[in-house]
Amino acid sequence: MNTEILISLGLSKREAEVYYALLHVEDALASELSEKTKEARTNTYDTLNSLIKKGLVSYVIKNNKKHFLAADPKNLLKWMDLRKDEIEKEKKLVEKLIPNLKSLRADKEKKVKVEVFEGKEGFRTALNQSVEDAKKGNKEILMLNALANILQEIDPIYQEKYYNLKKQEKIHTKYIFNGRVKMPKSPNAKYKFLSFPPNNMASTSIHGDSVIFWLITQPLIAIIVESKELAESYRNNFNELWKISKK
């Protein structure tokens, strides 16, 4: 046996060292144990008291001095059984606390989360995320100030994969374009047109509890903002604009 095994059973490093030292002698004074374990005497006394409470160490009085001795190693099993019972009690307590802990986590999750992705690969990551977020919501993506054929221009290889992914997941998309453009008919997409101030460098998409700002710059930048409140606000704005947009 070595101290590593005792530590793996649940004893602290100091407890393991003191108990291990006592196993090798009939009994010992605290000062002797302190010298063997190279620990301050006050620390050794604290450790001995802890081991006594665990039933792993006892003591006798000789010449008005406490001599400590290791209890029968079988007491390790008894102590482990007690520890097991305590763990079960703690487990039941944690189970009762889980609903409260979850509510705390939920409060944390309400905080706004912002991620920035750059380049073509970053755009692909953001596109995938838009589909994942839409799946969690009403399976709808709203695209404001949509830029016609922009994906075909910047990433034609991924365009088909993205459209197929939306089709596979039954995601419907509504586009509001800046000015009238020709778009192919699609059962999964609806198009409307509205005149905005000229802007060919930025679009906004809303899906689930997130909003993505797409910046057509060098490098390409996608800013994902996860916020239920922000997404709801943008969704409401989009729906109002949708009402006044032209087919």
Image: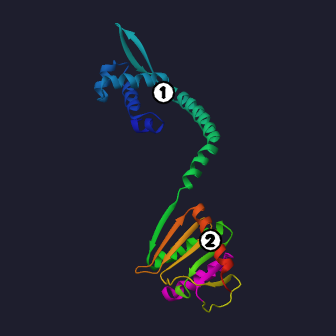
- Hey, which residue is sitting farthest top in the picture? 63
Name the disc covering residue 224, or none. Answer: none
Q: Nearer the viewer, residue 163 or 107?
A: 107
Q: Quadrant of the image for the N terminus? A: top left
Residue at 41% x, 20% y: name it: 69
Residue at 37% x, 13% y: name it: 66
In space, the residues marked 2 and 1 are separated at their CA atoms by 73 Å
16 with respect to 54 (left or right): left
* Between marks 2 and 1 in the image, the one whose residue lies nearer the viewer: 2
- Hey, which residue is sitting farthest right in the picture? 187
The percent position of residue 96, horizontal first and vertical second, equals 65, 39
The percent position of residue 168, horizontal first and vertical second, equals 67, 78
- Hey, which residue is sitting farthest bottom in the picture? 182
Say what amino acid the circle numbered 1 marks: Pro
The residue singled out by tag 1 in the image is 73
Range of residues picked out in magenta: 151-179
The residue singled out by tag 2 in the image is 237
The percent position of residue 32, horizontal first and vertical second, equals 30, 21
The 10 Å Cα crowd at callout 2, few under 14, some 14 to 19, many 20 or more, is: few
Residue 126 shows up from this direction = yes
Say what amino acid the circle numbered 2 marks: Asn
The answer to if 152 sits in the magenta stretch is yes
Q: Is residue 195 above or below residue 236?
A: below
The answer to if 125 sits in the magenta stretch is no
Q: Quadrant of the image for the C terminus? A: bottom right
